[in-house]
Image: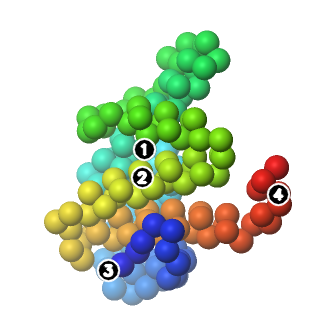
């Protein structure tokens, strides 16, 4: 089990090595392409749901930032299909946070919570592995932050 702000039990690369031995090649190729990038374009329904959610969250941030700068956000928005609860309040809380690091943590916690929701009903199938991969990538990102020079982050 993975926990947000928990220890990274293994790297994404190590996860891929383990999976390569245990799952069909076509499933491995899907896992191998997983990134946190919003540009990821994969036909798997779980990846599509993730991408739509993440794009919606990013769009809310764009709208808030554009409104603050008094510019039109339309040219910066990307098509999204997420129709869940409004992400406006999460984006607003992140924008208002005086610490950029804590704001990012708030956003990643929301991403993590969405992955938890997606995981419901998936036990040891490809969707479960995809969700696990996303979680590992989030933890890896925060592991890098934790190892970074704290003084340079405060500036």
What residue is disc 2 on?
A: 111
Q: Secondary structure at mark 3?
A: loop
Q: Is residue 65 above or below residue 42?
A: above
Q: Position of residue 59 (x, y in %)?
A: 47, 31
The answer for how far apart the CA atoms under marks 4 and 3 are is 42 Å
- Mark with earlier residue (2, 1): 1
- Residue shown at 34%/85% (left/top)? 22
Q: Mark 1 — residue?
A: 54
- Residue under circle 4? 152
- Foreground label between 2 and 3: 2
Q: Do the CB atoms of the residues marked 2 and 1 lie less than 8 Å apart?
A: yes
In the rendered image, the quadrant that contains the N terminus is bottom left
> Which-is-in-front pick, marks 2 and 1?
2
Q: CA distance from mark 4 to mark 2?
A: 26 Å
Question: Can you say whether 27 is above or below 42 in the image?
Answer: below
Q: Nearer the viewer, residue 102 or 121?
A: 102
Distance from Cα at disc 3 to Cα at disc 1? 27 Å
The mark that comes first in sequence, 4 or 3, is 3
Q: Residue at x 83, y 60 (%)?
A: 151
Whole-percent x, y for residue 26 in the image: 33, 69
Q: Which residue position is annotated with label 3?
A: 23
Distance of mark 2 from mark 3, alpha carbons?
A: 26 Å
Q: Earlier in the sequence, mark 3 or mark 1?
A: 3
> Disc 4 versus disc 1: distance between alpha carbons?
28 Å
Q: Would residue 117 appear left or right of 101 to someone viewing this image?
A: left
């Amino acid at each position: 089990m993975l926990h947000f702000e928990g220890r990274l039990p293994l790297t994404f690369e190590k996860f891929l090595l383990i999976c390569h031995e245990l799952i069909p090649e076509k499933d491995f190729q899907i896992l191998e392409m997983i990134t946190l990038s919003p540009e990821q374009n994969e036909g798997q329904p779980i990846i599509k749901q993730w991408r739509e959610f993440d794009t919606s969250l990013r769009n809310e941030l764009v709208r808030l930032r554009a409104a603050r700068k008094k510019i039109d956000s339309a040219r910066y928005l990307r098509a999204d299909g997420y129709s869940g609860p409004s992400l406006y309040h999460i984006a607003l809380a992140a924008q208002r946070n005086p610490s950029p690091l804590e704001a990012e943590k708030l956003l990643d916690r929301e991403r993590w919570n969405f992955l938890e929701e997606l995981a419901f009903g998936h036990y040891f199938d490809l969707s479960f592995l995809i969700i696990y991969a996303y979680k590992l990538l989030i933890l890896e990102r925060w592991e890098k932050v934790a190892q970074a020079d704290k003084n340079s982050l405060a500036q």
